[in-house]
Image (tube, rainbow, N blue to C red):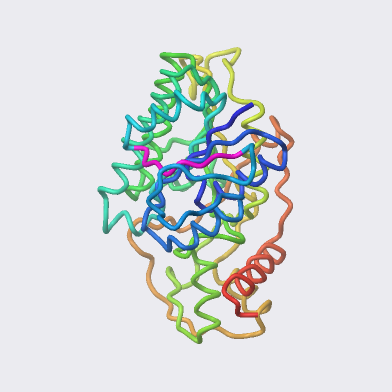
């Protein structure tokens, strides 16, 4: 089976590609190598999945040391190039992880979210329809729950009140996927990720920012006075969940339901640790692991931030026996070890 993974130079995409290659899948990677954060980190991820980086990073097709992996530099808003890749590679499965990420950045640059998360998403699912790819898995987000106050967050809850543009674009992905599933029979499975962390993570995420600040004796801003609660989920547990869904995509349900009245081959799962942690406790674990105290600037909650996230993963457990088993103590230590090695801080 040949799997096309978009966002393959990104944090989750990089880890997913590595795992798929170890399981002997053929993989086609796509990424636009955006400048949202350090391009060198993205290039190093590619190097660590066997991609040979040429001197000119604008090259559109990169070679790989593996016969099972090929990488294209491609933006999902470039429909013509995207169609060319579908025609030449003929993927059996598409896993769409490409997106403009980050809640706070959406306040500064909303256009990036519309282009990548709405136009780009429609382009990729439309190519699935046009080129007869009947297994489409895509990244949604816990941000879709927005102003929802029921805990834990359940896929049966209404998600009509996003409090960030990022969350709104992810909700739109779910709606578009349902429409394509209903109209064309595409088996589409959405995964609402909950605060993913681990080695090779994004530099704009809390753990990365905190470790960097602690090493450099810098003050960290801690929002909502440290009372944020997050269902921190280690990257290996996320990737295991994604691969399970790839292997067993959504199918036509036996009965109609409020979530799927048209009986489309469509499914949404939460994928989280199912064990929320207070942000200040997360910070204390970092301090313990690094044997050093933070300088903290406590601040009010920021616009677009959800105070608490907590994933109800019942459906994922029922359908796939999903068992996230990485504690924050283990996950944080693995990130610190990677960070010190990668930036030669050890």
Number of numbered tags placed on the structure image: 0
Quadrant of the rendering where the C terminus is positioned:
bottom right
| Rendered location of residue 163, percent (x, y) | 34, 49
Q: Is residue 82 left or right of residue 108?
A: right
Residue found farthest to the front = 55
Pick the front one: 98 or 147: 98
The residue depicted at 61 percent of the width and 50 percent of the height is: 50
Q: Is residue 160 above or below residue 228?
A: above
Q: Quadrant of residue 123?
A: top left
The residue depicted at 44 percent of the width and 64 percent of the height is: 204
Pick the front one: 165 or 151: 165
| Rendered location of residue 249, percent (x, y) | 60, 25
Q: Is residue 217 above or below residue 82?
A: below
Q: Please tell me whether residue 290 belongs to the stretch shown in magenta.
A: no
Quadrant of the rendering where the N terminus is positioned:
top right
Magenta residues, start to end = 69-76
Q: Quadrant of residue 233?
A: bottom right
Q: Main secondary structure of the magenta part?
A: strand
Pick the front one: 160 or 200: 200
| Rendered location of residue 339, percent (x, y) | 60, 70
| Rendered location of residue 104, percent (x, y) | 35, 59
């Amino acid at each position: 089976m040949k799997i096309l993974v978009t966002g393959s130079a990104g944090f989750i995409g990089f880890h997913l590609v590595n795992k798929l290659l170890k399981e002997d899948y053929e993989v086609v990677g796509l990424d636009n190598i955006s400048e949202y954060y350090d391009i060198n980190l993205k290039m190093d991820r590619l190097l660590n999945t066997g991609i040979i980086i040429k001197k000119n990073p604008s090259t559109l097709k990169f070679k790989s040391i593996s016969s099972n992996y090929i990488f294209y530099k491609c933006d999902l808003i470039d429909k013509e190039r995207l169609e060319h890749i579908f025609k030449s590679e003929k993927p059996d499965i598409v896993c769409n992880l490409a997106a403009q990420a980050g809640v706070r950045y959406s306040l500064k640059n909303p256009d990036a979210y519309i282009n990548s998360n709405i136009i780009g998403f429609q382009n990729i699912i439309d190519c699935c329809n046009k080129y007869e790819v009947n297994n489409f898995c895509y990244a949604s987000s816990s941000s879709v729950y927005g102003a929802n106050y029921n805990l834990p967050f359940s896929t049966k809850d209404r998600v009509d009140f996003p409090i960030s543009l990022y969350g709104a674009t992810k909700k739109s992905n779910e709606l578009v996927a349902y429409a394509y599933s209903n109209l064309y029979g595409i088996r589409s499975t959405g995964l609402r990720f909950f605060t993913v962390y681990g080695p090779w993570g994004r530099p704009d995420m809390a753990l990365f920012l905190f470790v960097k600040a602690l090493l450099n004796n810098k003050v960290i801003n801690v929002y909502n006075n440290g009372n944020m609660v997050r269902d921190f989920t280690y990257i290996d547990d996320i990737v295991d969940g994604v691969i399970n869904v790839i292997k067993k995509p959504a199918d036509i349900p036996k009965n109609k339901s409020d979530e799927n009245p048209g009986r489309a081959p469509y499914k949404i799962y939460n994928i989280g640790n199912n064990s929320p942690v207070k942000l200040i406790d997360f910070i204390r674990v970092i301090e313990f692991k690094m044997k050093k105290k933070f300088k903290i600037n406590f601040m009010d909650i920021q616009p677009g931030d959800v105070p608490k996230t907590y994933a109800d993963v019942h459906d994922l457990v029922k359908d796939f026996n999903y068992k996230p088993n990485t504690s924050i103590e283990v996950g944080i230590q693995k990130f610190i070890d990677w960070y010190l090695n990668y930036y030669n801080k050890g």
